[in-house]
Structures are given as structure tokens and as C-alpha cells.
Amino acid sequence: MVEPHYIEHAKLVTPDAIVPDTTVEIADGKIARVITGAGAAVVSDLPVSRRVDAHGAYLAPGFIDLHIHGVHRHLVDHGPEAMAAMSGILPRYGVTGWLPTVCPMKPGDDARFIASLAAAGGGVAGARPLGLHLEGPFLTLTGALPPEALGQADARRVEALIAAAQPYRLTFSIAPDFKEIVPLIRLMARSGAPIFMTHTHASVTETQAAIEAGARHATHFYDVFPWPDTTEPGVRPCGAVEAILADPRVSVDFILDGTHVDPVAVRMALQCKGPDRVCLITDAMIGAGLPPGRHRFGDTDVVFSAPGAPARMAENSRSPGGLAGSGLTMNLAVRNAVKLAGIGLPQAVRMAGANPAQVLGLAASKGRIAPGYDADLVLLDDNFDVLRTWVAGKTVFRKE
């Protein structure tokens, strides 16, 4: 057994409060003790090699990004080497776990590609893949996705994809109004992975049917969720958004970059869902985290005007100027929750860590700083810049 080590003089971010002058003991990759008040001084005589002085910075559970395509010059769709590179980069933004998100491909090609990612996932260093995420092909609206995003109902294809993802669980993003989607949702749900709803023009009835079948999360909520057609002049129609907000079993996530969604929608979701069913994601594309500029995404270019700004399609694309994901990083998403939406830091951190862990069925081991939990941690300064990140108690990023 490796001797325990300690993070001292931290402001501990709990789900409900910030606790000053806290010491956290880490042993064998887990949180062993959380020491507050006078008891925190017990480690002061230990060797410096076993202590990290937080100097009053915020110590929070590591962030989990449920929906991310790329970062820096890497894109999940480029293959296992790109996924490994992203795992190495993401801790500098506080991410300790993530769902590598794949755009739709042709039948057969998708299963082979998913299998290649699954085979490589166990060997990556840094942020850990906590599953794999396929955004499509069972969607009704493409948004910024390629035409392959729209497929046909095919149970054998679903089974092949789930098998290809082993030993990881495969999360599908689906549209509730996709033809014959309900039997597919039931099939997908057997694996135990969450099923995300998105890219949809679904009615209330269609959305409720998808929820009953097992779809219990909505990703990049409000984006590619257009309002239903008006059937009675002057009467505001309801559709997928309202059905999702009304059902307490369904969680949601947002791209909170100031453009993809109005912060008031995030605050409304918190009122409807409570504190533990609203998450932050990045939906980041290649170029996220880099200085503003132009970057290649699939068969087109995307442009970022500022750090953390939305990705927009370049003039040579099929939809010039259209949104194509974001340039967000998770630490900026937390900052925006505080600065743009007026959400307290404990709640913002919960939306980036504990709540995504719950979506993935990992709430008993990730997303909290408490004895027995994985020592996946991030140290943040007052500007939400990442100072240090740990995965299973080991430093995977340290700001120089």
C-alpha cells in the first residue's frame, strides 16, 4: 500500500457549500479522509513530498464532459490516437472523465470505428473515457452533423454497435420522433447505458413514449430542439422541450457559452429539475482551447472568434456562419454558469461533476469529495483557471 498523501489549505467545494481550510487525504486512488477546522493541521509535520499546498484555491470534484467531439487539434472522429491525445489534454481544463463523442458513419464503418476506440480506451493516460457516445444515426434533424446523421431503424445495427463498444457502454443520442425509435430505445437500454434525446422536432406524445421506453437524458438541450408548428393562432404549442422539463426522471445538459442557450433557460431547468438533474457540457469541436482562428472539422472549416466562443461554419461550408458546436472547455462552462447565469459555485461544480456522474450511473464513486470516492479532483483559482488536476489520486496536470 502506498503511503497516503494530502492536499491542504484548500477551499473545499461541496454540493451545497464552500468549506475553507480543508485537508483531503488520498490513499490508493481514493479519498480516505476529509479533514476540516483544527483537525486540518494534523499533516503539517509530514514530509513536503506527501503534501500539496492549495494556498486557498478551490478544490472540486473532477469535471465529467458527457458530450465532446474535439479539443485543440484533435477530433474523436480521427481515431484512437486522437482520443488518446484528447485524454492527455483535457485535464488542463479540469476534466477527469469524458464520453468520446463520435459523429455518424456509414453502417459497418461505425461499428469498426467504435471497436477501435474501445480497444484503445484502457491504455490512455489522463482523463478517462467513461463510455463512448454516438451522436446518431437515429436522428430526424442534422443540425451541424453530416448527412450520415440520418439513418433507418435497424435493430441489428444497434446490436452490432453495442457489441463493438465492449468493454465500454455505448450511449446513443436519438430523436424521439425518429420512425420506429421506441423498439430501438428498449434495445439500447438493455446495456445499462443512458440514452440521450436530441436533434428532434418531436411532439409531446412522441417524447413521452421515448421517455417511457428508457430515454432519460436530453443533450445540448434547447439546441436543435425547434418549437412545434402552431396549430391554433395565439396558442403557444408544446413539444419535446416541455415534455422533458415536465418529467422528473429526465436530466438535461446545456452548452453554456452565451450563444447556444440563453442563461435563463438554464435557470428555468434548475427550477423544474432541481439541483441534481442539470449538467454542463462543452460539445467542443476541434480548435477548442486554442487561440481564436480557423480549424478543420470533417469536410469543412470552423471558426472561433474568441476563447470559449461557439464554433461557426466557415464560408466554404454548406451553412456559412451556422453553429457547429462550441469552443468551450469545462472550466469555462463552470465560469459561465457563475458569471452569466448567476449560479453559485457549489451548484455550478455539481453541474460539471456530480450530476454527469449520476447520468452515467457512477454517482457512488465519482463527483464528490468524500471518503471512498475516486480521487478525481481539480484545483481552481478565483478566475476558474485550472491549477492542478488529479485522476485516481495521481497528478495529470499541473500549471507551470
Image (tube, helix red, strand yellow):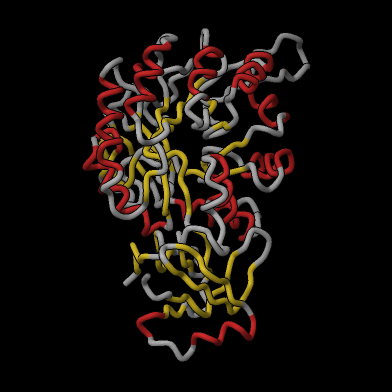
Q: In the image, residue 307 lies at what x, y percent? A: 40, 52
Q: Nearer the viewer, residue 172 or 295?
A: 172
- Asked whether residue 281 is in view, the answer is yes
Q: Position of residue 80 (x, y in %)?
A: 24, 39
Seen at 40% across and 18% down, the residue is 158
- Quarter containing the C terminus: bottom left
- Left or right relative to 360: residue 318: left
Question: Total label count?
Answer: 0
Q: Is residue 10 above or below residue 17?
A: below
**Furthest residue to the front?**
1
Above or below, 231 relative to 133: above
Q: Residue at x 38, y 12 (%)?
A: 156
Q: Residue at x 43, y 58 (%)?
A: 94
Q: Nearer the viewer, residue 212 or 379?
A: 212
State the quadrant of the N terminus: bottom left
397 to the left or right of 22: left
- Residue 173 image position (x, y, % from top left): 47, 26
370 over 249 or under it: above or below = below
Farthest residue, direction left: 81
